[in-house]
Image (tube, rainbow, N blue to C red):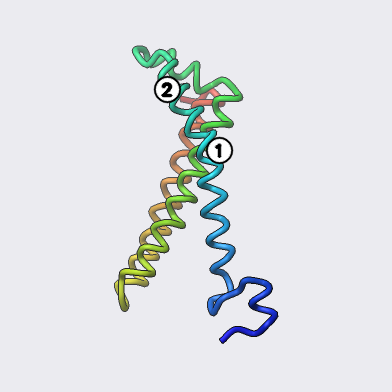
Amino acid sequence: MKSPLNQVLGLGAAKEGTGHWWHQRLTAVAMVPLGLWFAIAVLNVDMSSYAALVAWIREPVTAILLCLTASCLLYHSWLGVQVVLEDYVQGATKVVSLLLSTFAHAVLFVVCLFSILKIAFGMG
């Protein structure tokens, strides 16, 4: 049973489902131009030499777009995996799975950003 105010606000029992849904949709929409840019850029960059790839990543626009792509992709992935785990895993395994998923996505996020920024600022 929802109160009339909750029906208007779109809040369910967890008080956050609508926000989660919107974040997942917004990251999906953001991934369309970012994914297209990434696919086109990867097809056009010279991957035959390490130096050419590093030079491409050191371009400011490229580094920024790579950081945005990695951030958006990992956040979207984390949201999606969270929904699957909440819907299909039961009991204590659910809590452990959610913690492991959050930790893994956070580690991947830090590794991606660190790697991109290290190359972009000329330290790699």
Residue type indicated by callout 2 = Val
Q: Position of residue 123 (x, y in %)?
A: 50, 25
- The numbered mark at residue 42 is 2
Displayed quadrant of residue 53: top left
Q: Position of residue 56 (x, y in %)?
A: 50, 18
* Residue appearing at x 46%, y 22% in the figure: 40
Q: Position of residue 97 (x, y in %)?
A: 33, 65
Name the image quarter holding residue 42.
top left
Nearer-the-camera pick, 101 or 37: 37
Say which mark, if any, is on residue 17. none
Which of the 4 image quadrants contains residue 82? Answer: bottom left
Task: Give the residue at mark 1.
Answer: 68
Residue placed most toward the observer, 5 or 41: 5
Quarter of the image containing the N terminus? bottom right
N-terminal of the pair, mark 1 or mark 2, is: 2
| Left or right for 106, reference 67 | left
Relative to 91, 36 lies left or right: right
Q: At x 68% / y 82%, what residue is drawn?
A: 4
Tally the numbered discs: 2
Q: What percent of the width, then of the height, locates residue 124?
A: 46, 25
